[in-house]
Image (cartoon, helix red, strand yellow):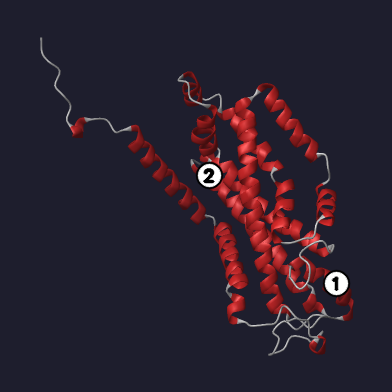
């Protein structure tokens, strides 16, 4: 009887870890290639980067006083001294646009991150637990959904003195509902897959199922929703600021600039309204373009067409 020959290292089949790593790298390259082919996606990403540089690096180059009002130079039209003029308080509009963009992007990105992380974990845990736990958790989401978001924002912002951390918490409080529902729906499909069932049969804990299988395989849905969450947060902050419930003076925000300048628009002071309005539209559209591109790039069916 012949003894089976031992396989050499070169003859051994590739390890699952190595195969998984190569597959992951290949997927990343496919996603990056599909993203780069989408011209609107590249434009959206370029606009976001440009606005970030404008808001964070701009004040280092264009020095203005955004703390103390100066009524002696109020309502000046655009000129060499003030490229976008001044507002009713004497603040330089271009400098205020930069500072307002900083707060808008900081809050938008922070809300997008917090709402996405919490909503993802909430939805994934709800789907994996199932049964009565899932029913109770999702009825809680439905209950919050039944409350008009703007009404809830106004109540919460009126109860507390607005500041940067508080606005992040308030906006995140209403923003986690959408990712929770989306991830739960995705997780309900993923939990029936063979590899998830195999983990359960092998005695794997539910936490491992969530972290190692549900969340990584729902990353496409999570990433797309995160970009939309940032855009929604920028709009929500602009709405609160326009209603006077945003960051208190002398802090600047695009919504606050709209609120302060709208009464002067009919007097011909267009520079106090249009720059902030255009900035809000541009940033929101850019994040939506980025989200659409991520959705198309991460969709396997679209990549195979």
Q: How many marks?
A: 2
Q: Out of 1 and 172, give the one closest to the viewer.
A: 172
Q: Relative to 152, does residue 193 appear above or below in the rendering?
A: above
**Residue 298, labelled with which disc?**
2
**Image point (74%, 85%), residue name:** 78
Q: Position of residue 133 (x, y in %)?
A: 68, 26
Secondary element under disc 2, as helix, strand or loop, is: helix
Question: Mark 2, residues whose alpha carbon is within 10 Å: few (<14), some, or many (≥20)?
Answer: many
Question: Mark 1, residues whose alpha carbon is within 10 Å: few (<14), some, or many (≥20)?
Answer: some
Q: Position of residue 109 (x, y in %)?
A: 63, 57
Q: Which residue is mark 1?
A: 262
Q: Relative to 138, does residue 277 appear above or below in the rendering?
A: below
Viewer-nearest of labels 1 and 2?
Answer: 1
Choose top left, top right, bottom left or bottom right for residue 72.
bottom right
**Image point (64%, 52%), residue name:** 112
Q: Out of 186 and 96, give the one closest to the viewer.
A: 96
Disc 1 versus disc 2: distance between alpha carbons?
41 Å
Q: Quadrant of the N terminus?
A: top left
In this image, 7 relative to 16: left or right? left
Choose top left, top right, bottom left or bottom right for residue 206.
top right
**Image point (39%, 40%), residue name:** 23
Q: Out of 271 and 230, give the one closest to the viewer.
A: 230
Q: Residue farthest to the front?
A: 160
Q: Out of 68 and 273, give the one closest to the viewer.
A: 68
Q: Residue farthest to the left?
A: 1
Which of marks 2 and 1 precedes in the sequence? 1
Q: Position of residue 292 (x, y in %)?
A: 61, 50
**Image point (67%, 72%), residue name:** 99
**Residue 181, labelled with which disc?**
none
Secondary element under disc 1, as helix, strand or loop, is: helix
Q: Position of residue 139 (x, y in %)?
A: 76, 31
């Amino acid at each position: 009887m012949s003894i089976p020959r031992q396989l050499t290292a070169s003859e051994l089949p590739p390890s699952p870890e190595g195969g998984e790593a190569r597959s992951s790298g290949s997927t990343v390259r496919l996603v990056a290639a599909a993203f780069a082919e989408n011209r609107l996606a590249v434009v959206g990403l370029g606009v976001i980067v440009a606005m970030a540089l404008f808001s964070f690096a701009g004040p280092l180059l264009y020095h203005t006083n955004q703390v103390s009002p100066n009524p002696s130079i109020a309502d000046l039209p655009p000129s060499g001294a003030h490229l976008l003029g001044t507002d009713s308080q004497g603040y330089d509009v271009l400098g205020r646009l930069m500072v307002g963009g900083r707060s808008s992007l900081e809050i938008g990105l922070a809300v997008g991150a917090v709402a996405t992380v919490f909503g993802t974990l909430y939805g994934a845990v709800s789907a994996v637990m199932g049964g009565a736990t899932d029913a109770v958790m999702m009825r809680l989401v439905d209950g919050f959904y039944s409350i008009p978001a703007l009404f809830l924002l106004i109540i919460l912002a009126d109860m507390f003195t607005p500041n940067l951390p508080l606005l992040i918490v308030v906006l995140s409080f209403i923003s986690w509902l959408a990712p929770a529902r989306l991830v739960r729906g995705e997780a309900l499909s993923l939990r029936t897959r063979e590899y998830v069932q195999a983990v359960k049969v092998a005695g794997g804990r539910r936490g491992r199922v969530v972290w190692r299988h549900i969340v990584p395989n729902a990353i496409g849905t999570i990433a797309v929703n995160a970009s939309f969450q940032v855009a929604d947060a920028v709009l929500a902050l602009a709405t609160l600021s326009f209603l006077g419930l945003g960051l208190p003076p002398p802090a600047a925000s695009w919504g606050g600039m709209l609120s302060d300048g709208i009464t002067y628009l009919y007097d011909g002071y267009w520079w106090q309204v249009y720059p902030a309005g255009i900035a809000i539209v541009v940033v929101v559209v850019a994040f939506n373009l980025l989200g659409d591109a991520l959705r198309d790039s991460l969709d396997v069916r679209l990549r195979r067409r």
